[in-house]
Structure formats: C-alpha cells, structure tokens
Amino acid sequence: MAQAESADNLEQLLRATAAGDAQAFRRLYEASSAHLFGLLMRMLKRRDWAEEALQDCYLKIWQKADTYAPEKGQPLAWLMTVARYRALDLLRVRRPEVELPDEDEAPPMTFADGAADDPQLRAVEREGIRRLNDCMGGLAPEQRRSVLLAYYEGYTHQELARVLDAPLGTVKSWVRRGLQRLRECLDA
C-alpha cells in the first residue's frame, strides 16, 4: 500500500474511531501499534514501560480521536505525538533526574539481523559514531547539552528551558543552531 493510501486509511480509521466504531479502532491499532511501540521503546528503553505507555496511548486515542485535525498533519504523526507525550510523562515520573553521557562515551551500538558479526558494518558504525562525537565536540556547551537532552532524552523545548534555566527562544536557538552545525560538520 502506498504511503498516501496508508495515511488516507489511517485518517478514515481515526474518523470512524471518533464515531465510536470499535472495529475501526482495532484496525487502527493493528495498522499503527508497531510504529508507536518502536518509538516508545526508543524513548523509554524498557519493554514493560513501553507496553504500559502503549496501552495508555490507545486509551487516549480512543477518547480523543475526534480532536485529530487532518489539516494540521498526517494521522501517523498525530498518533506518534500522543505516544511521545505519554513517554515523556512516564519519564518525568520515573526518571526525574537525567544524567548526560560523558562526552567520550558513545551510545551502545545495536545491530539488527546479526550484523554484529560483520566487521565491515561494525567499522562503518564506529566511524559514524566517531564522526558524530567529533562534531558534537565542536558545538558550544549549551548547544551540545540542548541537542543531547532533546534528541537523546526526548525533552521538549519547554522542558529544556526549565532544566537549563534559559528563555524558551534561547533554547530553541541553541537546538536549531546545534543541529545546523552538526549537519554542516557531518556533510563536510
């Protein structure tokens, strides 16, 4: 099925769910739960938390499907936003203090489909991580911390402003400029 057809299908399922159609809700779950669960696992890093959050997400989706507005974005993006906010809520409750990794510490490498046994793939992955670490080292400290918290820990701009004790506009600039510098560095 093409991506546009999939979006149209999800939109129809959301409309039917908003009207109380339990069968459409089941099909919506089948069509989207793998995406949401993957996002929740990446953010929460614990299967039990991700499963709990997924259940909460679909309860919220059942209750709030009528608030989806197609003109504001794709249905999957709306569903992912519901999941992201639920994950952030859980992280706030269960992990109130976030530690940043040491600058020399690379994130753990994970490989799918047995790729860990392939030395060439491992070398490419290590080189990519080394380049990213080098580029991160070139960022100003506030940019580096903002980018790490936003993309490694899932903080929103508002949360970053509170944690970093800086104005919201400043935090947005740090993230935007940090990402721009990373992009330029990695493309060089």
Image (spheres, rainbow, N blue to C red):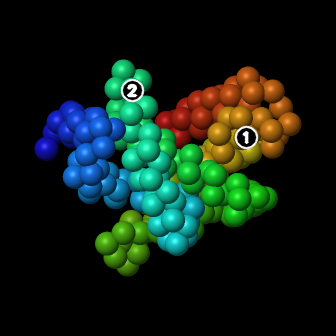
What residue lies at 42% left-to-right and 59% top-to-bottom?
37
Question: What is the total number of numbered labels drawn onto the structure image?
Answer: 2
Measured Cα–Cα span from mark 1 to mark 2: 25 Å
Residue 140 appears anywhere in the view = no
Seen as rendered, the residue at the extreme front is 20
Q: Residues within 10 Å of mark 2 (few under 14, many from 20)?
A: few
Q: In the rendered image, which quarter is residue 185 located in?
A: top right
Seen as rendered, the residue at the extreme right is 165
Q: In the rendered image, which quarter is residue 10 located in?
A: top left
Residue 12 appears anywhere in the view = yes
Q: Position of residue 178 (x, y in %)?
A: 66, 34
Q: Residues within 10 Å of mark 1 (few under 14, many from 20)?
A: some
**Side of 4 relative to 168 (left or right):** left
Q: Position of residue 156 (x, y in %)?
A: 65, 39
Q: From this view, report whether residue 124 is shown above or below residue 83.
A: below
Q: In the rendered image, which quarter is residue 97 located in?
A: bottom right
Looking at the figure, which quarter contains the N terminus? top left
**Side of 131 relative to 115 (left or right):** right
Q: Position of residue 39 (x, y in %)?
A: 46, 54
Disc 2 residue type (three-letter): Ala
| Disc 2, SS | loop
What residue lies at 55% left-to-right and 32% top-to-bottom?
184
Give the labeled residue for mark 2: 69
Disc 1 residue type (three-letter): Glu
Q: Position of residue 105 (x, y in %)?
A: 69, 64
**Side of 154 relative to 162 (left or right):** left
Nearer to us: label 1 or label 2: 2
Of residue 63 and residue 52, the one placed in the foreground of this image is: 63
What residue lies at 39% left-to-right and 39% top-to-bottom?
65
Give the labeled residue for mark 1: 159
Disc 1 vs disc 2: Cβ atoms closer than 8 Å? Answer: no
What residue lies at 53% left-to-right and 47% top-to-bottom?
84
